[in-house]
Amino acid sequence: MAKPLDGILVVSVEQAVAAPFCTSRLAEAGARVIKIERAEGDFARGYDTAAKGASSYFTWTNQGKESLTLDFHDPEDAALLGRIISQADVFIQNLAPGALRRAGFKMEDLREADPRLITVDISGYGADEAVSHLKAYDLLIQAEAGLTGISGGETELGRIGVSICDIGAGMTAHSAVLEAVLLRERTGDGAALSVSLFDVAADWMTVPLIHTEHGAGPPPRSGLKHPSIAPYGAFETQEGELTLISIQNDREWQVFCEDVLQMKNATKDPRFATNNARVRHRPSLESLISSVTLTLNQVEFQRRLSKAGIAYGGVNSVQDVAQHPALRRRVVETDTGDQLSIPALPVRWMDAPPSKTPAAAPTPGAHNSALREEFSQ
């Protein structure tokens, strides 16, 4: 079966996670992705050795790409990159702001030379002079954008446990490229796109900002509790295990009281009659619920929840996730030639045949000879 982006050439001067995540999804959709690296390679190659000696980050985000190492400051290498870009459909970069421009590659000039070209700048904060000089890595953006201010426990700030700003920027850039490709099909014109990690994180912070500027203030850090819905959090059972429950409306609250807590009188308590009331009286609410859950083992608690149709989930470790019945897997190959089983791509094409194992993550400059020959003129 043909893939959606068959025939699309993507050239990416990329490093770390954000741009490589974007182009990895384009590659999975059939695009040819040429990854431009320094001679020493993308520094994400050295983030860890967890993938059987290779980097887990690099292995995840670089399957099936071609690697070309070059030096922008070398006239022959710069000319080679120019020739490759001249044949590209999409050109992506996430170097420090201004780095590519200083090397002689201005996005506006590239677009003027080829109006069908789609260009994508991925940065930490955008090009505004007030912030463009700031270095931008995932945890820095989490902190600057306020994500850490609403994450963690009541007395401790918390980093979100994955590189969520990098991943979010890559996802956003990916969707923007697809939109630009669709637009080009109708108009014949490419597009100049820009995505910053901060803008993506700020968009996700919309609800906390509305609460801060127009409501009762920012949501407090609440650990395994929802700041504005109750009960929505983790409760301990007899053996010390945690189960996360979620009550989304007052009807569910009544069912929960009657069938799970087996306390019909609780439905008549005005402190718990509405969600807003339950949030205001959260300590009393949680004390009431815990007085029941601590007398039950987890199996019985979850059995009651399931029978009542109340949403719940286990508070799993990473080891638990590895054995989860919902976890689908795919096999990938590292740049050192080892195979790994990692989570499958999240989108399922239900009418498509099983996808083949993609080409491996490339070693630095693995395709130098072939690419230099192909684009020699």
Image (cartoon, helix red, strand yellow):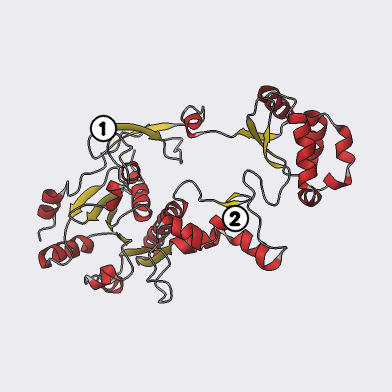
| Distance Cα–Cα, label 1 vs label 2 | 39 Å
Q: Amino acid at mark 1?
A: Asp
Q: Which quadrant would the C terminus be assigned to in this image?
A: bottom left
* Above or below 67: residue 331: above
Residue furthest bottom as drawn = 129
Crowding around mark 2 (Cα neighbors within 10 Å: few <14, some 14 to 19, many 20+) is many
Q: Amino acid at mark 2?
A: Ile
Query: Which mark is first along the chain, 2 or 1?
Result: 2
* Residue 353 appears in view: no
Residue 190 image label: none
**Residue toward you, 373 or 54:** 54
Residue 330, image x and y in percent? Answer: 37, 33
* Above or below 328: residue 77: below
Q: Residue at x 27, y 36 (%)?
A: 53
**Residue toward you, 41 or 238:** 238
Q: Residue at x 37, y 71 (%)?
A: 133
Closer to us: mark 1 or mark 2? 2
Left or right: 108 as drawn, with respect to 129:
left
Residue 374, image x and y in percent? Answer: 13, 53
Residue 338 image label: 1
* Above or below 181: residue 102: below
Q: Which residue is mark 2?
A: 150
* Residue 251 appears in view: yes
Q: Residue at x 82, y 29 (%)?
A: 262
